[in-house]
Image (spheres, helix red, strand yellow):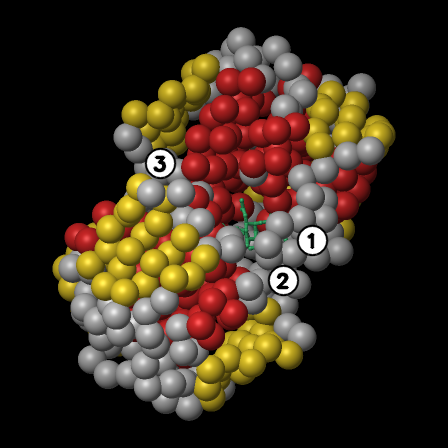
């Protein structure tokens, strides 16, 4: 079982390039199956989740190879729309292959992806959206079979701005007959990246980034090449890592406009941030200041995917901070582990009350999900002594060799292959 062993107390310095966005690459890889041909994607990180998606595409009859940051996908030979259950179990977000497969083959078989450490994560909005476009759905146990003679445009209102449901419905609507209007759509930058990719393939979509997306059905699509946007959550993670170690670093190849809410919160905590084109300079000479209230909400508000990382920074801030998690019902699993490192955090329903302490102490802790794992690494960077983070496969799902990036910035962190 691989672990990360961190010697705390070093201030980060230097510069790193931020890799491409996992949550943009995954739906774009799924979209490649919508029409046969060869696609080349650039700025794709090497992550466990990307590898699972490539395994799924191969299981469906495609060929897919990753060389460094480039992925080539050949989808002409795709012959199946039945996603293997064991692969679905490895990555919930394979659910947004439904739209592309339904569009290409008129049918798709998937399995209920089930909940995970951060919450129930239902898929009812996905299924209801596909039904609105004309799909018939039958569920037998955890197996879901979805068929559609012909997909037709519809007016769809999402109960909540689900990222995955927005993506699934967008892709299913691209070659549907007529126009689809999707209301209360998610507005994340990854949705805009998907719209740009689909339009490069010949789709006719407008509105991504707003709460209303309009998709005019087109008769066909063409394969294309595309470069994925930078990963705003990885960038935010490193902003916090620099701040908590009282360091000074530069993040390159980022899009600062994707991080407005995060930058706002960090500046309120006293962190110095200078934006210079696609570079963000961040430094923090002193302890952070408490932030009286942070509420996670859909984009453009403060992202749930940076809640645990910022909580670690606030655990060493002067004063009491309150964080309210409104997106996932189970996203405080990192609190127990942080408490074992000396943090003073009390959870009441979906709010966490974080009282800053003078220091954290190294300990052996366990990652429970991707971003909680990243938060524990950040805590280890600042803690006194040695921190060992276990179950780091969670972290490898979303960070391309996190220890290499941190070592480049002067951290003492090694991956132990036990
Ligand atoms: C995407 O997950 C991201 N994953 C998540 O990132 C991110 O945390 C989340 O959006 C919110 O921003 C990918 O893009 C691959 P949602 P997704 O549908 O699409 C409820 C990471 O760390 N819901 O917006 O699954 C759901 O239970 C990951 O990179 C329904 O009730 O998120 C949740 O409470 C973690 N019914 C809320 O909506 C549905 O049909 C938001 O979920 C769908 C969702």
At a point 40% along the width and 43% down the height, the residue shown is: 1
Whether the residues at callouts 2 and 1 have beta carbons within 8 Å, the answer is yes
Structural crowding at the residue carrying mark 2, measured as other residues with C-alpha within 10 Å and reported as few (<14), some (14–19) or many (≥20)? some
> In the rendered image, which quarter contains the C terminus?
top left
Structural crowding at the residue carrying mark 3, measured as other residues with C-alpha within 10 Å and reported as few (<14), some (14–19) or many (≥20)? many
Which residue is more in the foreground, 384 or 140? 384
* Kind of element beneath mark 1: loop
Gap between marks 3 and 2 measured at Cα: 27 Å
* Kind of element beneath mark 3: loop
Left or right placement of residue 164 versus residue 238 in this view: right
Instruction: Return the residue at label 2.
Output: 330
In primary-sequence order, the first of circles 2 and 1 is: 1
Q: Position of residue 134 (x, y in %)?
A: 81, 30
Between marks 3 and 2 in the image, the one whose residue lies nearer the viewer: 2
In primary-sequence order, the first of circles 3 and 1 is: 3
CB at disc 1 and ligand 1 closer than 8 Å: yes
Q: Position of residue 326 (x, y in %)?
A: 63, 68
Q: How many marks?
A: 3
In primary-sequence order, the first of circles 3 and 2 is: 3
Q: Is residue 8 above or below residue 403?
A: below
Gap between marks 3 and 1 measured at Cα: 27 Å
* Quadrant housing residue 332: bottom right
Specify whether residue 396 is in view: no
On residue 46, the disc is 3
* Quadrant housing residue 265: bottom left
Instruction: Return the residue at label 1.
Output: 120
* Quadrant housing residue 315: bottom left
Q: Position of residue 155 (x, y in %)?
A: 77, 44
At a point 53% along the width and 9% down the height, the residue shown is: 77
On residue 297, the disc is none
């Amino acid at each position: 079982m691989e672990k990360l062993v961190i010697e705390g107390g070093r201030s980060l310095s230097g510069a790193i390039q931020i890799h491409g966005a996992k949550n943009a690459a995954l739906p774009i890889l799924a979209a490649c199956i919508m029409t046969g041909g060869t696609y080349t994607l650039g700025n794709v990180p090497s992550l466990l989740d990307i590898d699972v998606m490539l395994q799924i595409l191969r299981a469906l009859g495609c060929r897919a190879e990753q060389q460094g940051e480039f992925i080539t996908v050949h989808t002409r030979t795709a012959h199946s729309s039945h996603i293997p259950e064991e692969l679905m179990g490895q990555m919930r977000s394979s659910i947004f292959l439904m739209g592309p497969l339904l569009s290409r083959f008129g049918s798709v078989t998937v399995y209920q992806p089930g909940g995970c450490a951060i919450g129930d994560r239902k898929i009812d909005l996905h299924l209801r959206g596909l039904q609105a476009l004309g799909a018939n759905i039958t569920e037998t146990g955890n197996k879901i079979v979805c068929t559609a003679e012909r997909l037709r445009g519809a007016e769809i209102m999402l109960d909540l701005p689900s990222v995955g449901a927005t993506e699934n419905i967008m892709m299913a609507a691209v070659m549907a007959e007529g126009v689809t209007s999707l209301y209360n759509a998610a507005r994340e930058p990854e949705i805009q990246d998907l719209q740009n990719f689909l339009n490069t393939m010949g789709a006719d979509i407008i509105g991504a980034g707003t709460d209303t997306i309009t998709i005019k059905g087109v008769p066909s699509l063409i394969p294309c090449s595309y470069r994925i946007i930078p990963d705003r959550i990885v960038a935010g993670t490193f902003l916090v890592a620099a701040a908590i170690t009282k360091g000074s670093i530069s993040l390159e190849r980022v899009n600062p406009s994707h991080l407005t809410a995060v930058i706002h919160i960090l500046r309120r905590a006293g962190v110095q941030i200078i934006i210079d084109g696609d570079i963000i300079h961040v430094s923090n000479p002193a302890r952070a200041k408490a932030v009286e209230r942070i509420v996670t909400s859909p984009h453009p508000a403060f992202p749930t995917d940076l809640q645990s990382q910022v909580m670690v920074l606030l655990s060493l801030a002067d004063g009491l901070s309150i964080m309210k998690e409104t997106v996932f019902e189970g996203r405080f699993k990192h609190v127990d582990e942080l408490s074992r490192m000396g943090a003073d955090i009390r959870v009441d329903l979906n709010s966490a009350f974080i009282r800053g302490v003078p220091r954290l102490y190294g300990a052996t802790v366990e990652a429970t999900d991707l971003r909680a794992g990243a938060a524990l690494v950040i805590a280890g960077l600042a803690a006194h002594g040695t921190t060992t983070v276990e179950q780091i496969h969670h972290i490898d799902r979303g960070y391309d060799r996190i220890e290499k990036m941190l070592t480049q910035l002067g951290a003492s962190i090694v991956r132990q292959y036990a």
